[in-house]
Image: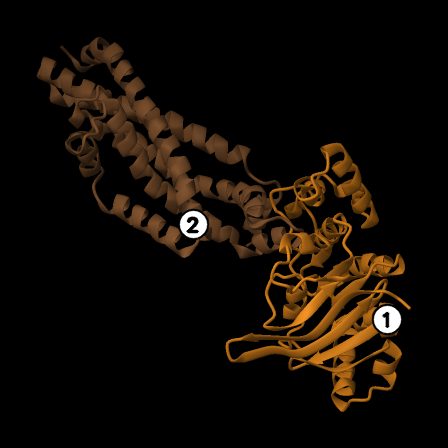
């Protein structure tokens, strides 16, 4: 069986696996986005104790391997009386982990927008949180996109670790194809191509988002500098 | 007698050991334009920020109308609604059009309906002569236009008093005129204004009173005529002479 035949034979299987991979990426990214936003706001604008919690969380989840976190959630939590399904464990590990990274992207752009916009908002009578919501976040989110674009791409590939708790994602399908065909190189290469295509499409979407959200006149501003 | 809008009594501010200003007392009556002048680092900007509660004074009191805004239980967001502030660097909301910059406070602070807010915002943009730029973003406007939008944004809240913190210092010389023109018009319309500026032409022509601040204290205050032609204090005379030399040349020539 040549490579093309292998690819054709397993394509339906790969597509099914890719579906799971996309699902994991989307859910992980969404959990990570909202939790990351809360963490960054807590770290940037919260009172001292909240700041400390946010920093502790971020350091903990960035400082330990995702695989360790995944195993603690899937294999460790049951001994504490909390048994989660494979998918749920995967969602949770990816989301909690991504949150720590996304929080740092958020924080960077919140800092870049700076305190002067806060002053401007407060000066017309907006409260602190209203200023954050209506003035700072809309700008910080836009500013964040180019750097943050790493995260969806990175996460998409990182999801591959979940095959270790037997989630049937793209990587798990590759492993099965390799076992059945005795052709690991062909199988993994085939799956690599599928990952590559997904990343390519994702990247295109992110670039589109970046273009769509640009603030008119602002691109000139940065060129001037 | 004119009604006092803003009253400052024995206000002091320190950053650690460093005294920013000390024992400042100042009254601004309704319709007055008061210009504060003085060398850099004498606490002029900090004084304005104290009045707007963007920072806090260590001692002393400030009243806006009959409300003591330095009181502990004072709702600072409410106070700021009634005090318009214009900054040296415009500080427009960069992600919003000129119109939306002016509208934001109306819809989110005063909770006006969008239609009414838009109408009011267009009225204010018209006051600063920028109706035709309503749809432009700050990045598409010149510095002078940005500052005029910032003035419209502050005016839209119907403030009791407008504070101007060196509104023309960040502008190219040829853009200063349009901003001063708007301020001149506001003063004529009876807006109560407290202006920190180095524009001596403006001060001389528009101010009801000029306050000369140095090293955190009021050295002298009086009518433009008094300060420019009969200063009581040697330092006032020296400073005004120097600053007019630097900034006032073009007005002299007119």
Image location of residue B141, percent across then percent down: 69, 48
Q: In the rendered image, which quarter is residue A97 located in? A: top left
Q: Is residue B203 above or below residue B220?
A: above
The quarter of the picture where the N terminus of chain B appears is: bottom right
User: Is A201 situated left or right of B145 in this image?
Assistant: left
Q: Position of residue A120 (x, y in %)?
A: 62, 53
* Relative to B56, residue A30 above or below: above
The chain drawn in brown is A
Image point (39%, 28%), residue name? A202
Choose top left, top right, bottom left or bottom right for residue A73: top left
Task: Identify whether B111 is placed above or below A74.
Answer: below
- SS assignment at label 1: loop
The residue under the point 82% across, 45% down is B126
Which element is circle 2 on?
Answer: helix
Asked if both marks, 1 and 2, belong to the same chain, the answer given is no
Residue B27 visible within the image: yes
Callout 2 crowding tier (Cα within 10 Å): few <14, some 14–19, many ≥20: some
Give the residue at mark 1. Answer: B208
Residue pictured at 67% horizontal, 42% vertical: B104
Q: Which chain is orange?
A: B
Corner quadrant of residue B80? bottom right
| Residue topped by disc 2 | A108
- Residue at x 29% of width, y 20% of height: A20
Q: In this figure, what is the number of numbered marks? A: 2
């Amino acid at each position: 069986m040549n490579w093309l035949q292998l690819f054709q034979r397993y394509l339906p299987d790969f597509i099914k696996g890719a579906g799971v991979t996309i699902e994991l990426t989307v859910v992980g990214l969404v959990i990570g986005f909202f939790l990351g936003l809360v963490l960054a706001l807590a770290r940037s604008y919260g009172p001292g104790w909240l700041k400390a919690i946010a920093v502790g969380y971020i350091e903990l989840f960035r400082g330990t391997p995702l695989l360790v976190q995944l195993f603690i959630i899937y294999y460790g939590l049951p001994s504490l009386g909390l048994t989660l399904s494979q998918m749920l464990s995967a969602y949770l590990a990816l989301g909690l982990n991504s949150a720590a990274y996304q929080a740092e992207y958020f924080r960077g752009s919140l800092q870049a927008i700076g305190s002067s916009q806060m002053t401007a908002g407060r000066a017309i009578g907006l409260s602190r949180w209203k200023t954050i919501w209506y003035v700072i976040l809309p700008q910080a989110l836009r500013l964040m996109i180019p750097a943050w674009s790493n995260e969806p791409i990175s996460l998409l590939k990182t999801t591959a670790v979940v095959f270790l708790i037997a989630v049937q994602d793209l990587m798990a399908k590759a492993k099965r194809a390799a076992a059945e065909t005795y052709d690991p190189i062909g199988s993994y290469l085939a799956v690599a191509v599928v990952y590559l295509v997904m990343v390519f499409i994702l990247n295109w979407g992110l670039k589109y988002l970046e273009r769509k959200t640009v603030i008119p006149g602002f691109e000139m501003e940065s060129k001037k500098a | 007698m004119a009604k006092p809008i803003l009253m400052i009594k024995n206000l002091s501010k320190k950053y650690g050991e460093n005294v920013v200003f000390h024992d400042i007392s100042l009254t601004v009556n309704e319709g007055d334009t008061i210009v504060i002048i003085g060398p850099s680092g004498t606490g002029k900007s900090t004084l304005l920020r104290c009045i707007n509660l963007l920072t806090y004074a260590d001692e002393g009191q400030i009243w806006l109308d009959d409300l003591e805004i330095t009181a502990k239980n004072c709702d600072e967001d409410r106070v700021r609604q009634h005090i318009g502030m214009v900054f040296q660097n415009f500080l427009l909301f960069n992600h919003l059009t000129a119109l939306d910059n002016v509208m934001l406070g109306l819809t989110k602070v005063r909770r006006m309906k969008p239609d009414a807010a838009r109408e009011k915002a267009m009225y204010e943009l018209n006051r600063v002569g920028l109706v035709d730029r309503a749809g432009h973003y700050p990045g598409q406007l010149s510095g002078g236009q940005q500052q005029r939008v910032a003035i419209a944004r502050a005016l839209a809240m119907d403030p009791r008093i407008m504070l101007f913190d060196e509104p023309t210092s960040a502008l190219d010389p040829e853009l200063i005129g349009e901003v001063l023109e708007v301020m001149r018009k506001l003063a004529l319309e009876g807006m109560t204004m407290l202006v920190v500026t180095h524009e001596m032409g403006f001060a001389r022509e528009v101010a009801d009173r000029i306050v000369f601040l140095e090293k955190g204290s009021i050295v002298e205050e009086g009518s433009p005529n008094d300060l420019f032609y009969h200063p009581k204090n040697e330092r006032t005379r020296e400073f005004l002479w120097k600053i007019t030399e630097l900034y006032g040349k073009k007005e002299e020539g007119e």
